Image (cartoon, rainbow, N blue to C red):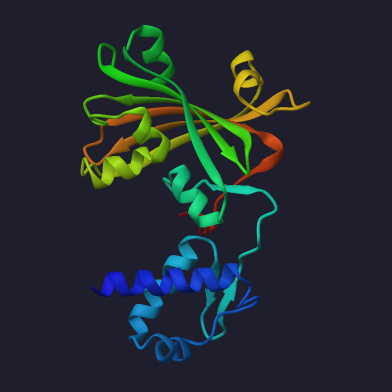
């Protein structure tokens, strides 16, 4: 139960920060323990989670300073394995997903070279268009191992594949490797996306692994570049470390 409690405090503080209730720094630990009726350790865990997400930074003896700035563009995290549904909830976006193509394939040599998925394995291949505020701004090319993403369907893919895998299939999604490139728009991009005069996209190529170390997904996510920012928070290591 303590985990549930600190998560609730984390969400409340995060919402307050996003709403501008704490523009510069958080209240003291003592104030927060009294506000939430909990221990200092529970408050510290919630603040630690805010630090991990880049919302605040603790300075010993000085307090907890707010780093959050309301994004002018849709922001996606470098540091987290995050579904589109989770990103939409975090950034309060109006996002809908439409599956425009869904099929089952066997991985051949060209597909293996592209995705890293084992040759001969059966996979689901799908294309999903992401609409933000009614505009078609992202085109995803998804490849999922059938042996891991069992029973995947277009209906599930329009909701959340990760939510289905974690809640229904009890799969543990652990790690994603990402590569970011800028590429010229292709005919398929122009067919599905509202590109206007833009001829380039930001492409995020991802390989995702489960708790057994099995790569179960490869995705190429193609974004209209003017509406997106990708960010992460890192710490400087001491020289020689």
Q: Position of residue 229 (x, y in %)?
A: 64, 45
Q: Position of residue 120 (x, y in %)?
A: 25, 11
**Which quadrant holds the N terminus?**
bottom left
Is 180 rendered above or below residue 26? above
Residue name at image x 45 percent, y 50 percent: 86
Q: Is residue 198 left or right of residue 99?
A: right
Q: Is residue 188 left or right of residue 194?
A: left
Would you identify the image quadrant in which residue 172 lies?
Answer: top left
Residue name at image x 21 percent, y 40 percent: 169
Please tell me which residue lies in front, 235 or 32.
Answer: 32
Q: Position of residue 154 (x, y in %)?
A: 37, 28
Please tell me which residue lies in front, 120 or 179.
Answer: 120
Is 220 rendered above or below residue 213? above
Residue name at image x 56 percent, y 55 percent: 91
Is 23 rendered above or below residue 207? below
Q: Is residue 178 left or right of residue 191?
A: left
Can I make out residue 234 in this image? no
Residue name at image x 73 percent, y 23 percent: 199
Q: Position of residue 27 (x, y in %)?
A: 54, 85
Can I make out residue 90 in this image? yes
**Which quadrant holds the C terminus?**
bottom left
């Amino acid at each position: 139960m303590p985990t549930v409690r600190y998560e609730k405090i984390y969400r409340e503080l995060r919402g307050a920060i996003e709403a501008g209730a704490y523009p510069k720094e958080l209240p003291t630990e003592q104030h927060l323990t009294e506000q939430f009726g909990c221990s200092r350790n529970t408050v510290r865990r919630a603040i630690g989670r805010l630090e991990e997400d880049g919302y605040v930074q603790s300075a010993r003896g000085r307090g907890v300073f707010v780093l959050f700035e309301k994004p002018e563009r849709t922001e996606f995290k470098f540091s987290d394995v995050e579904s589109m549904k989770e990103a939409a909830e975090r950034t309060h976006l109006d996002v809908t997903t439409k599956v425009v193509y869904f099929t089952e394939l066997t991985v051949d040599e060209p597909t293996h070279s592209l995705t890293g998925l084992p040759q001969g394995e059966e996979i689901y291949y799908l294309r999903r268009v992401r609409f933000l505020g009614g505009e078609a701004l992202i085109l995803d090319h998804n490849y999922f191992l059938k042996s891991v993403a069992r029973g995947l369907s277009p209906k599930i893919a329009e909701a959340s594949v990760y939510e289905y895998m974690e809640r229904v299939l009890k799969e543990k999604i652990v790690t994603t490797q990402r590569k970011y490139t800028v590429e010229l728009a292709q005919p398929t991009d122009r067919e599905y996306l509202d590109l206007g005069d833009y001829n380039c996209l930001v492409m995020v190529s991802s390989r995702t692994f489960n708790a057994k170390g099995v790569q179960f997904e490869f995705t190429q996510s193609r974004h209209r570049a003017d509406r997106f920012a990708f960010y992460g928070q890192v710490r400087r290591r001491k020289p020689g470390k």
